[in-house]
């Protein structure tokens, strides 16, 4: 079977089956959070894993998408669902404008530049109290789909799960397309990619815009699910968490981004039994993953399975 379809079928099977094991509605909400966070992580995987560009500003685009869900209905009178593509388009446009100059940078210079963008977005969201509600945040109107209002964790579980499936399908198709092969070439060596005729600047910018759109859609879905958004959605720590998800899951792997997101969302829930030592245990586990599975969980486990004797 084609690996792309195998990945999608496995993910669809997981989404369809695990609700049978949920003892309460709380688990639906946690799983819905996993799916929407994974969607944002998949977008960052396109930029970091496929194009090889480091970004510490991904949460800035998540925040833009999230606040579009509140500001569009409030100031433009738009239905909240119409603000989801609007927020994605706005994030893509900002990424296009910002990405043209900063993607000329490389390595840690690029990381610092994207970090500055995320900090700038967070500062605007905090300081413009009259518009954004400031540090206290702002409420999101409840969406309505043909008279149906999604309520509770179960409804958002299926909505976010469907969005993740679409996002993974698009990312896998990109990875195996001519554009994806061009991104892989510049990931290995920009000089070599330029030598064989690849427009490096255009492909890097394209990956940056795609990552921004993914982040904005994830932010918009998360905002609608919560019914509320604060500037923390665009905070520096959120950007670091997204990078950690992609690296732990496996930079070169689209399903790795999903696994990394699931790990970083679920581990804090499971480690609450350690009370005051929760963050220390989480940090230790992340260190162990990176020591023993340096290429990431999914590629690392796949390599171990391939080395097993028949």
Image (cartoon, helix red, strand yellow):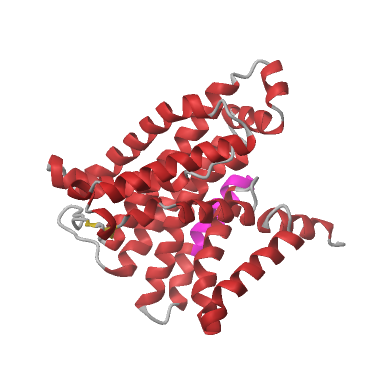
Residue 214's place in the image compared with 197, above or below, is below
Which of the two residues, 190 or 113, is positioned nearer the viewer here? 113
Where is residue 245 drawn, in percent x and y? 56, 56
User: Relative to 155, does residue 166 appear above or below in the rendering?
Assistant: above
Residue 54 place in picture, x, y as percent:
58, 40
Image quadrant assignment for residue 214? top left
| Residue nearest the observer in this picture, 16 or 133 | 133
Residue that sits furthest to the right in the current view: 309
Determine the residue positioned at 49% across, 25% down. 101
Pick the residue in front: 147 or 190. 190
Q: Going by the image, does 73 lie left or right of 9?
A: left
Q: Position of residue 223 (x, y in %)?
A: 30, 56
In the picture, measured across the screen, residue 253 lies left or right of residue 63, that is right
In magenta segment, residue 79:
no
In the depicted view, which residue is nearer to us: 255 or 10?
Answer: 255
Q: Is residue 5 magenta?
A: yes
Coordinates of residue 168 in the picture (x, y in percent): 50, 47
Query: Going 65% across and 15% down the picture, which residue do you hit?
Result: 197
**Residue at far left of view:** 77
Label tally: 0
Residue 25 in which image quadrant: bottom left
Task: Tell me where residue 286 sits by quadrant.
Answer: bottom right
Residue at 52 percent across and 41 percent down: it is: 171
Q: Which residues are magenta?
A: 1-14
Tell whether 23 sits left or right of 55.
left
Q: Main secondary structure of the magenta part?
A: helix
User: Relative to residue 93, is residue 309 depicted above or below?
Assistant: below
């Amino acid at each position: 079977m084609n690996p792309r379809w195998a990945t999608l079928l496995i993910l669809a099977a997981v989404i369809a089956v695990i609700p049978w094991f949920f003892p309460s509605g709380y688990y639906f909400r946690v799983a819905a959070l996993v799916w929407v966070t994974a969607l944002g992580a998949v977008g960052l995987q396109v930029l970091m894993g496929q194009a090889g560009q480091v970004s510490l500003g991904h949460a800035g685009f998540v925040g833009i998408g999230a606040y579009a869900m509140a500001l569009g209905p409030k100031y433009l009178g738009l239905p909240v669902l119409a603000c989801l593509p609007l927020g994605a388009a706005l994030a893509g446009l900002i990424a296009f404008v910002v990405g043209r100059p900063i993607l000329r940078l490389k390595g840690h210079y690029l990381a610092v530049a994207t970090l500055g963008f995320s900090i700038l977005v967070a500062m605007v969201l905090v300081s413009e109290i009259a518009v954004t509600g400031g540090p206290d945040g702002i409420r999101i109107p409840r969406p309505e789909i043909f008279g149906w209002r999604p309520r509770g964790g179960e409804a958002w579980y299926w909505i976010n799960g469907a969005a993740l499936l679409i996002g993974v399908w698009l990312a896998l198709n990109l990875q195996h397309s001519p554009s994806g092969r061009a991104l892989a070439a510049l990931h290995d060596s920009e000089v070599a990619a330029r030598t064989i005729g690849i427009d490096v600047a255009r492909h890097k910018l394209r990956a940056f815009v795609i990552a921004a759109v993914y982040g904005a859609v994830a932010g918009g879905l998360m905002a609608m699910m919560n019914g509320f958004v604060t500037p923390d959605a665009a905070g520096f720590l959120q950007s670091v968490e997204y990078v950690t998800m992609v690296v732990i899951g496996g930079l070169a792997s689209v399903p790795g981004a999903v696994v990394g997101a699931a790990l970083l969302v679920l581990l804090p829930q499971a480690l609450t039994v350690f009370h005051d030592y929760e963050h220390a245990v989480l940090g230790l586990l992340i260190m162990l993953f990176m020591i023993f599975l340096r290429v990431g969980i999914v590629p690392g486990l796949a390599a171990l399975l391939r080395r097993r004797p028949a």
